[in-house]
Image (cartoon, rainbow, N blue to C red):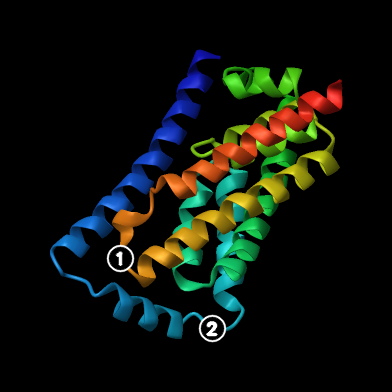
Amino acid sequence: MARAARGDRRSVKRELAALGALIALGIALEALDVVDWSVALEWARAHAGGWRLPAAIVLAQLVLYTFAQPGSILFWVAALLYSAPVATLILTAGGTAGALGAYVFARRLTRLDVSAARGHRLFSILERQGDFFTLCALRVLPGMPHSAINYAAGTLALPLARFLSATALGLAFKSYLYSAAVGAATGSAGPSDLLRPDILGPLFAISVLLLLGRFLHRR
């Protein structure tokens, strides 16, 4: 159990470290005038047409999330190359497909050993409160380890329709806000403008409203 918890923490730390490294690299290149972001972005978008790249992003997320890897890293590819609505569709499809893959994979593992998932605090949360509102709120909250949510839901055998609908809705909210922020930053200033309160604030607000909805629904 302790080993599983340490593994989950390492997975989250890898994802946050990769995200931080990308942001730091972007800020450094911007400050040193090494990259003209507007020119680089237009060049990349000119080569992003067709269906193959979106399909590849969805497939990559499916594989990464299924095996508890940081599939959200692919967010940067979609958000930088596509408009916010298109990026939202791609990321929601990939994240939901990956959630389904992880759910099914966790169900198969459960037949052998459930202690791996029980080591994560999200397991106890979902064991007590695996309703739609809580699932959706966890997806929307910034910094939530999606792979841990997927595996906990699969191990607990939460209703699949509820799990997937909450996943799709939560990821759509988060993907659109983040993609819009990335589009605005790369179109005007640069990567240093990504982590703004006006972007993170709505995500926390939506999560609070969802949890409030859960409370009222239980009443």
Decide: few, some or many residues near mark 2? Use Cα within 10 Å; few <14, some 14-19, many ≥20.
few
Q: In which quarter of the image is the N terminus?
A: top right
Asked if the residue under mark 1 is in contact with the one under mark 2, i.e. CB atoms within 8 Å, the reply is no
Residue 15 visible (yes or no): yes
Q: In this view, does 188 lie to the left or right of 90?
A: left
10 Å crowding of disc 1: few (<14), some (14-19), many (20+): few
- Specify the label residue 40 is tagged with: none
**Spatial CA span between label 2 and label 1:** 25 Å
Q: Where is residue 110 in the image (x, y as percent from the top left)?
A: 73, 26
For badge 2, the amino acid type reads Gly
Which amino acid, by three-letter code, is at mark 1? Answer: Ala
Residue 106 in sight here = no
Residue carrying label 1: 189
Say whether disc 2 or disc 1 marks the residue closer to the N-terminus.
Answer: 2
Q: Mark 2 points at which residue?
A: 49
Residue 35 at what x, y percent from top left? 22, 71
- Residue 145 occupies quadrant: top right
The residue that appears at 66% across and 17% down in the rendered structure is 124
The residue closer to the viewer here, 76 or 38, is: 38
96 displayed left or right of 194: right
Q: How far across and how far down the image is residue 205, in percent?
A: 59, 38
* Residue 189 as seen in the image, left or right of residue 88: left
- Quadrant of residue 188 in the image? bottom left
Above or below residue 119? Residue 100 is below
Q: Is mark 2 on a helix, strand or loop?
A: loop
Q: Nearer the viewer, residue 43 or 211?
A: 211
